[in-house]
Every structure is written in structure tokens, then in C-alpha cells.
Image: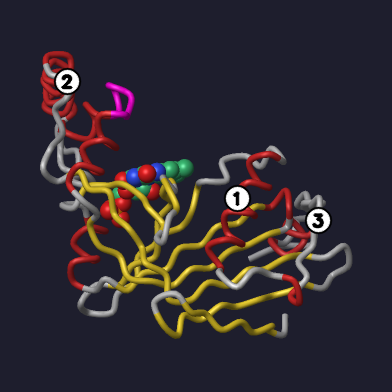
Amino acid sequence: MTTDDTPSIRQLLKRAKKSSPDVAGLDPESVPESPMDLFVDWLETAVEGGVTEPQAMTLSTVDHAGTVSARTLLLKDVDDAFWFASSSLSPKGRQIRENPRVALTLYWREQGRQVRILGDAGPGPRETSVADFTARHPDSRAVAIAMPQSTPVDDDNEAQQALDAAKARIADDDEFAPDDWTAFRVVPTCIEFWQATTGRDQVRVRYDRTAPTTWTRSRLWP
Ligand SMILES: Cc1cc2nc3c(=O)[nH]c(=O)nc-3n(C[C@H](O)[C@H](O)[C@H](O)COP(=O)(O)O)c2cc1C
């Protein structure tokens, strides 16, 4: 409940700072045939333009019962797929086994850009997972092996002991990588690029995969 002198949430949200994007534009007539080329072009523009953490993306998954989950992850690489790394024993790992259909969403507010990706997720080669894990900071590696990801912490002492043991293990063997650490790849079937314009309009272009290397393009009404 709000009273006369209590600002409503609507009023609060109206006062929130708006982004004033440095709009680079998107001409639907001159986009490349492959959305992967456009994605890499946008990613380069984001990195070179100083977008903060452009590799942060939302991964949405669905389990066998149709329950949706979403969380932020880091994009690790792009080739013919989008890569991220996590534990295969985590909730997201289980959900991907139950249903490989996932969505990735990136928002680069400084440039008024959003990319939505729909695709199929699965594990990449073991050597990619090992390389990803061993490249992580030792403390991050220790956290990843101390206890299973997303399990409740019921006992702080027990958790600290597990973390200390994990740090010792990592210090002892710099090449160790646990079996569950997985470099996942998302092979896209649909990618949409959304560009804010200087006005209140947006330009949207969607690519749909029709064959392994063939895509159709459509412009979407904002
Ligand atoms: C900016 C940011 C980056 C993250 N990057 C990763 C990541 O690369 N891998 C990962 O497993 N979790 C990452 N996390 C944590 C996840 O959001 C999530 O809490 C964790 O993976 C457990 O997810 P789950 O319980 O759905 O499996 C990140 C969180 C944030 C806020």
C-alpha cells in the first residue's frame, strides 16, 4: 500500500536513471548472411566500445516438467556455437540433460543492443572442459570442487574445511580438473538482434536456421 507521501513503485521507477546508448545502428538490408558473423561483429564493437562485462549472458533452461530457470553465466567462446562452462552436476547441467533446448540472452545497454539466441546445449570435448577449468583462477577452481554447485550450506565449518581441502588439492596438482566441469556448447537455431535507435524505435532482425549453414532473415516489428 502506498500513501500520499509515499512514492509508489511506479514513481520510483520513473526516477530511475535511463541509459543513453551510443547507438551504432543496424541496417537490416546490409546484415551478413550468417548471424555468427553479425554476433562476432557486435561482440567486437561491445568490447572495443568499453561495454562492461559484455560476456555476461542469461542462460534459460527448462526441466522435464517444463519448469523454467534462468541465471547469468559468462560466454567463453564463439565458433559455430556459443560456449559457457559449468558443472554438469548443477541444476542447469541436469536440466540440459533432461531438455537440451535453451535460450541465451545478452544485453549491452551502453550500445542499446540485445541478442536472443535459441539453441541446443550439450557438452563439448573433454579437453576443452579441462582447458577451461585449469585456466581458471586457483581460488575459483577450489570453490568449484569443494562442494557441489547450488547445494545448501548448512554448516559453515564444514564448508570452510571443504574449501581448505580443495585449495590444498589445487595447490598440489595444477592440472587437476574434476569430471563434472564441462564446457557446454549451444548450437543456435534462431538468433535475434535488437538495436535501439536514437528515437524510441527499435530495429529487430531475426535469423532462422533452415539447414546446417543456411539461414533465413526477417525484420520484426518492434
Ligand atoms: C556475472 C556472473 C557470471 C557468472 N558466471 C558463471 C559461469 O560462467 N559459470 C557458472 O557455473 N556460474 C556462473 N555464475 C553463477 C550462476 O549465475 C549460477 O548462480 C550458478 O551457475 C548456479 O546455477 P544453477 O543452480 O542454475 O545450476 C555467474 C554469475 C554471475 C552474476
Image vertical order of residue 18 relative to residue 163, above or below: below
Tell me what residue is drawn at x 21 percent, y 37 percent.
130
Residue located at (30% from left, 65% from top):
121
Count of numbered labels shown in the rendering:
3
The front one of 98 and 37 is 37
Q: Is mark 2 within 8 Å of ligand 1?
A: no
The first of marks 1 and 3 along the sequence is: 3
What residue is at 82 percent from the left and 65 percent from the top?
197
Residue at the location (58% across, 64% down)? 115
**Discs 1, 2 touching: Cβ within 8 Å:** no
The image quadrant that residue 141 belongs to is: top left
| Residue furthest out toward the right | 199
| 78, above or below 215, in the image | above
Q: Nearer the viewer, residue 15 or 111?
A: 111
Identify the mark nearer the N-term, 3 or 2.
Answer: 3
Position of residue 97 measured from the top left corner of the image (x, y, whole percent): 18, 67
Three-letter code, disc 2: Ile
Q: Position of residue 73 (x, y in %)?
A: 41, 49
Residue type beneath disc 3: Val
Q: Quadrant of residue 133?
A: top left
Residue 23's label in the rendered image is 3
Q: Which residue is mark 1?
A: 43
Q: Of the residues shown, which amino acid type is indicated by label 1?
A: Leu
Residues rendered magenta in the picture? 135-140
Q: Identify the element where label 3 is drawn.
A: loop
Quarter occupied by residue 220: bottom right
Viewer-proximal residue, 90 or 122? 122
Residue at image mark 2: 170
